Image (cartoon, rainbow, N blue to C red):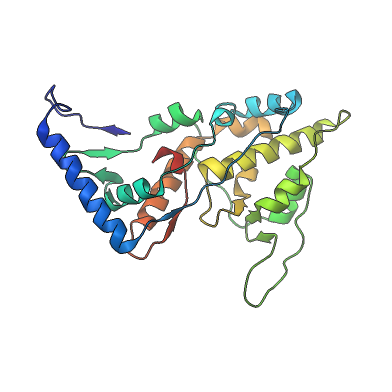
């Protein structure tokens, strides 16, 4: 996070700073007791037991996502995030703390997640033929929509694909005689999984958006986009939504909060 450290040199030794922190803790505690803790969605994303196949890793590096695969699986503190959301101000996209104002920046994303923050914006279509795109870039077509009267158990709902189905399609190792097309499909899968669990976490925690696939075709052009800018904008949106009175859960790049 970036913020104004003030002009004085003794900020951390100033008793007023600690008193302000105490007030924040008290206010946050009252808030949590009255309204409860937000459900901060998080899904672990583990690499294969023997690591990534070198052929797959080569395409991931070429796409500019090597740093994202070095991000460890960290637990998030639901209570702490809830307390910070209470300090979030949608008008400025910053946390208003008693002593100063702080925010999450592109530099934080670049340093902590190792993704590109310079390049083309992630602007594309939201109404593509998603089943066909999945077949083209993942090698598997999700089953047709199945309607349920009381719940949605469809594999693909709009552009949101169930994690469990996707993971099942790539459970086995890459074949030794796999074609270059199949190797790229496995690379697309691993990249999509990381994007959906780290950068663009869905509030449901059981689905991943396949919209980023359109920016991975061809995979060599993925490094021309500012993925960090897209992740930051998504996180800002999640924080704004979570700051509403009736909000009960939150998604986004929670590892940065």
Looking at the image, residue 193 lies above or below residue 53: below
At 44% across and 57% down in the image, what residue appears?
A: 249
Left or right of 11 on screen, residue 28: right
User: Which one is nearer the viewer's eye here, 171 or 230?
Assistant: 171
Rendered location of residue 66, percent (x, y): 59, 26
Q: Is residue 166 visible?
A: yes
Rendered location of residue 154, percent (x, y): 69, 64
Image-quadrant location for residue 3: top left
Q: Is residue 133 visible?
A: no
User: Which one is nearer the viewer's eye here, 74 or 68?
Assistant: 74
Quarter of the image where the N terminus is located? top left
Looking at the image, residue 204 lies above or below residue 227: below
Looking at the image, residue 84 lies above or below residue 226: below
Left or right of 19 on screen, residue 91: right
Rendered location of residue 218, percent (x, y): 69, 35
Image-quadrant location for residue 195: top right
Looking at the image, residue 59 lies above or below residue 129: above
At 11% across and 24% down in the image, what residue appears?
A: 8
At 66% across and 33% down in the image, what residue appears?
A: 47
């Amino acid at each position: 996070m970036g913020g104004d450290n003030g002009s004085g040199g003794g900020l951390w030794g100033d008793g007023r700073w600690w008193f302000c922190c105490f007030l924040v803790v008290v206010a946050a505690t009252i808030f949590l007791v009255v309204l409860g803790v937000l459900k901060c969605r998080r899904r672990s994303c583990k690499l294969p037991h023997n690591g990534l196949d070198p052929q797959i890793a080569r395409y991931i590096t070429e796409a500019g996502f090597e740093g994202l695969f070095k991000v460890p699986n960290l637990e998030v503190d639901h209570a702490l995030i809830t307390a910070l959301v209470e300090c979030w101000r949608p008008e400025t996209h910053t946390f208003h703390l008693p002593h100063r104002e702080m925010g999450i920046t592109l530099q934080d994303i670049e340093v902590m997640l190792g993704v590109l923050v310079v390049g083309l914006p992630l602007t594309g279509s939201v109404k593509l033929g998603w089943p066909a795109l999945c077949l083209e870039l993942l090698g598997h077509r999700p089953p047709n929509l199945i309607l349920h009267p009381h719940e949605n158990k469809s594999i693909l709902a709009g552009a949101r694909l169930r994690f469990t189905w996707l993971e099942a399609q790539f459970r086995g190792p890459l074949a030794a005689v796999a074609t270059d097309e199949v190797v790229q499909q496995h690379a697309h899968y691993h990249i999509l999984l990381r994007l959906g669990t780290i950068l663009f976490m869905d509030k449901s925690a059981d689905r991943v958006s396949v919209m980023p696939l359109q920016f991975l075709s061809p995979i060599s052009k993925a490094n021309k986009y500012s993925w960090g800018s897209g992740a930051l904008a998504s996180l800002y949106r999640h924080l704004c939504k979570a700051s509403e009175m009736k909000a009960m859960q939150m998604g986004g790049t929670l590892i940065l909060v």
